[in-house]
């Protein structure tokens, strides 16, 4: 039963992370506004807490690394979208 509780908690947490990121992405697409500080914080938090996101980020950073202060809003949105895709795949895996 503990495993079921953990899976339920993990899935709920991932769904919240997905929702937060999708909201920022959609808001940017609708209005052109991005709260860069909040987006960067979300990106960094997930890079530290999720091994799959960390692995994907490490692979990308091996090719090219740019400080967030120099990344365009589009680049930040792309990073958020990548995280959404990874988390979405993980939630599907948990459901199966």
Image (tube, rainbow, N blue to C red):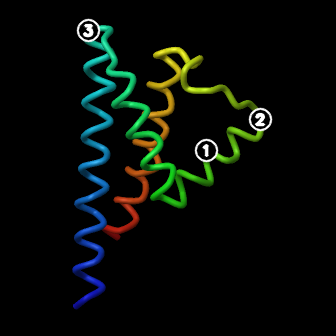
Where is residue 62 drawn, in percent x and y? Answer: 76, 41
Note whether 5 is above or below 35 in the view shown. below
Q: Quadrant of the N terminus?
A: bottom left
N-terminal-most mark, 3 or 2 = 3
Note whether 45 is above or below 25 in the view shown. below
Alpha carbon separation for disc pair 1 and 3: 27 Å
- Is mark 1 in CB contact (under 8 Å) with mark 2? no
Find numbered disc 3 in the image and state the secondary structure of the residue it sits on. Answer: helix
| Rendered image quadrant of residue 71 | top right
N-terminal-most mark, 1 or 2 = 1
How many residues crowd around disc 1 within 10 Å: few (fewer than 14), some, or many (20 or more)? some
Note whether 19 is above or below 34 in the view shown. below
Which residue bears the numbered disc 3? Answer: 31
Where is residue 10 drawn, in percent x and y? Answer: 30, 66
How many residues crowd around disc 3 within 10 Å: few (fewer than 14), some, or many (20 or more)? few
Where is residue 18 drawn, in percent x and y? Answer: 31, 44
Find numbered disc 1 in the image and state the secondary structure of the residue it sits on. Answer: helix
| Rendered image quadrant of residue 35 | top left
Name the one closer to the observer, 91 or 68.
Answer: 68
Note whether 96 is above or below 13 in the view shown. below
Q: Residue at x 25, y 41 (%)?
A: 19
Q: Residue at x 32, y 8 (%)?
A: 32
Which residue bears the numbered disc 1? Answer: 57
Q: Residue at x 44, y 25 (%)?
A: 77
Label disc, if present, on residue 63 of the rendered structure: 2
Question: Is 28 positioned to the left or the right of 76 in the image?
Answer: left
N-terminal-most mark, 1 or 3 = 3
Where is residue 56 drawn, in percent x and y? Answer: 61, 48
């Amino acid at each position: 039963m503990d495993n079921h509780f953990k899976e339920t908690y993990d899935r709920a947490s991932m769904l919240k992370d997905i929702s937060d990121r999708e909201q920022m992405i959609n808001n940017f697409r609708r209005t052109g506004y991005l709260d860069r500080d909040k987006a960067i914080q979300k990106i960094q938090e997930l890079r530290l807490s999720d091994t799959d996101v960390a692995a994907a980020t490490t692979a990308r950073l091996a090719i090219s690394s740019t400080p967030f202060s120099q990344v365009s809003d589009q680049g930040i949105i792309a990073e958020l979208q990548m995280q959404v895709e990874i988390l979405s795949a993980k939630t599907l895996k948990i459901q199966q």
